[in-house]
Amino acid sequence: MAANDTPFRIDIDLDHAEREAQRIRDWLAALRKRHDLSRFEYTRLVQIVPAGPTHSHPILTLGTRFSETEDLLLATYLHEQMHWYLWRLGGPDHDPVAPFFDELVRRYPKAPTRLPEGARSYEQTYVHLVVCWLEIAAVTELIGRERAEALADTQWGYRWIYRTVLQDWDALGQLLLEHGVLPIRTPAQLDALEKRGKPASPARKPGTTAAPRKTKRAALPKPSQKSRRKRPARGDRTTG
């Protein structure tokens, strides 16, 4: 049969994608056996999407990028769990970052607001100063400070954010402590507070908006007026 007479067909081979998804699942299962990840698991619903984006909400989703090693997968997983920690810490009516969002802007008025140095927007860059701090703290507890810093130093995205967090570790930690983000509560502690009807964060004020305000001292683009409570911060590390 001549080449031009061969029927045209397009095949889809999902074997590689399935193997990659299985690798991530096996590695995460191994990490959960090796470490007590339960104290940092604020959501227990996790899905793996081969070649898809990694993000925290509405379901914690792990792609197959940024998972070349078990350490990197651990950091990525904990990063997304820390988005859930902030979500649960504030409750339905309050974003725990909102009370000191302006202070972060005052401290870092020239923060980059685009990948790979910053995050995807003005708002998300400053939110990730908190998320990345919490991520590094959690990773440090599990595999030590040296490995945690090495991971932060070699991330493709959020480069300025990770550098700033490491450089200003104590000052940012004090800010998080003052506003009730620290110490990091376990899921069980948050569950107990929710059952008693008590706020997890002492900075919480009923009726406050979750949307940050633009500081007058920072000549930066106006942040989104949408509440982060209604549209939670996604922890993507993809280029999308």
Image: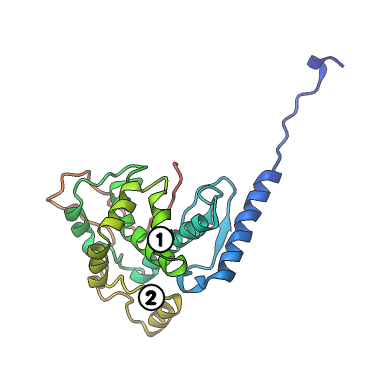
Q: Image check: 102 left or right of 198?
A: left
Q: Is 25 above or below relative to 114?
A: below
Quadrant occupied by the N terminus = top right
Q: Is 192 above or below relative to 228?
A: below
Q: Residue at x 30, y 74 (%)?
A: 201
Quadrant occupied by the C terminus = top left
Whole-Å distance between the Cαs marked 2 and 1?
24 Å
Q: Amino acid at mark 2?
A: Arg
Residue 173 picture location, percent across and down: 27, 66
Q: Amino acid at mark 1?
A: Glu
Of the numbered discs in the image, which one, if any, rests on residue 146? Answer: 1
Q: Nearer the viewer, residue 233 or 137?
A: 137
Residue position for label 2 = 185
Residue 234 visible, this angle = no
Q: Residue at x 34, y 61 (%)?
A: 133
Q: Residue at x 33, y 74 (%)?
A: 183
The local secondary structure at tag 2 comes to loop
Please identify the quarter of the rendering in which residue 148 is found. Answer: bottom left
Q: Image check: 4 left or right of 40?
A: right
Q: Which mark sits nearer the N-terminus, 2 or 1? A: 1
Residue 153 picture location, percent across and down: 38, 51
- Residue found farthest to the left: 217
